[in-house]
Amino acid sequence: MRAGTVPVPRAPVAPGATRHSPDGGDSPRAALLTRTVAVATVGLTGLRVPLPQGVVPGLVVAVLLAPVWLPALRHYRGARLLVALSVAAVLNGWWLHEWSAADHRVVLGLATGNTMLLAGIVGGAGVLLWARLHLSDAWVGVWLAAGLAGGELFQRGQWGTNPWKFAFVVPVALLVLSLARMTRQRVVEMGMLLALGVVSILQDSRSAFAIFALTATLILWQIVPVPVSTRRHSVLRDVRVMVLLALVAGAVYNAGTALLLEGSLGSAAQQRSEQQIQQSGSLLLGGRPELAATAALMRARPEGFGPGTIATPTDVVVAKTGMESIGYDTGNGYVERFLFGSQIRLHSVTGELWAYFGIAGLVLAVAVLVVLVAALASALSVRAASGVVLWLTCLTAWNAFFGPLYGSAAALLTTLGLVLVRRDTDAAARLTAGSGVRTP
């Protein structure tokens, strides 16, 4: 096998044919109709235009197609577990309203909107998982990227001062990396990742640059041939890969910090990074002081709040105390206006899932990370992880701690829909690795 070629451990499929037919009896006409429906539903899932009560078109599609995508979950490792945990989180969140009503104000419309947000993520991911049974993963990514870009074009008022950072980095990267995946060439994926990284740093998006750099590093590592081993060593191999992931992430963080402080990535980024490190002693804590607020609130109220619960002045004081402990100046009005102005916003998927849905929401967040990292480790161990899968997993791991739930919704449903491992594909990959044979 040539160096730089992505190994795909599955049987070849004729051009235009469906990858998988669950019932095994579709006629060509019925298969074409199913693929057409899959393309349309994937595009609508990406079209995240807000409707009343926080509903998006993808949620409507997910509800209508629930009888189709719910049975499809059995084809993917961890999918049914995540859906079950999501249902438990919603139930727990609404129970928390009764608990919080004694000393907090609860807004029903806000509760409905945050619940619909989670339902849209889970339902949209379910639709993508079903679509992957009939379309290649790369084409699912392409059509989803088209829908995501269309949704952003409908919401020009939400772009802020940096359209790349706040609107288009996810759809553009998803489109580019999905097209690169079709070539099955590592060098093409590397080139696209480097180009996306350069655009990100030019557009003052430090976190996006770091994620693209980490993804490119993992793509480069996969060029090293997989060693011949036996099947019983596959779990150990996955564990070693997880350790490697942590080491690579740490190395990329240290290298990125050094480049920022040296001014290699621009004077504006250098000044901001220096200020954040001087303030808290860490680039991560300085850039995301909301982590300290989240930790303080978790200690004071471990059960959470509820999806429609409004923070009290006591909660605000607790959050400020946590942020002040890392040197953050809380006298600028940011805590009152942004974090607790109209609802609780903790600027991390994990923190907000906990705040809205309590312990069950926290368990869901942890389960998402475990399932995704395990899926990535399994693919990396046989050198079969594509650039788009690597990037989505790294992006979601970042958002779990540093990205708000609403702003991360599109990336999260995309990751859940495209990264979860097909059971038949996973078995084929392990068999291939165990025999020491690599399928081109």
Image: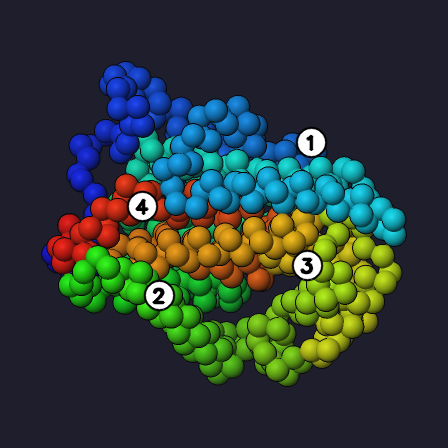
The disc, 1 or 4, on the residue closer to the chain's N-terminal end is 1
Name the front one of labels 2 and 1: 2
Of marks 2 and 1, which one's residue comes earlier in the chain? Answer: 1
| Front of the two marks 3 and 1 | 3
Dot 3 surroundings within 10 Å: few (below 14), some, or many (20 or more)?
Answer: many
Q: CA distance from mark 4 to mark 3?
A: 35 Å
Q: Tell me which amino acid carries mark 1.
A: Pro
**Is the C-beta separation of discs 4 and 2 under 8 Å?**
no
Q: Is residue 280 left or right of residue 139?
A: right
* Tag 3: amino acid: Leu
Q: What kind of residue is marked 4?
A: Leu
Judging by the rendered image, the residue that carries numbered circle 2 is: 239
Q: Which residue is mark 1?
A: 52
Q: Which label lies toward us, 4 or 2?
A: 2
Q: Quadrant of the N terminus?
A: bottom left
Relative to 106, is 24 above or below? above
Q: Which mark is residue 346?
A: 3
Using the image as rendered, state which of residue 197 and residue 394 is in the foreground: 394
Mark identifier at residue 179: 4
Count residues near mark 4 (Cα–Cα under 10 Å), then give few for <14, some for 14-19, many for 20+: some
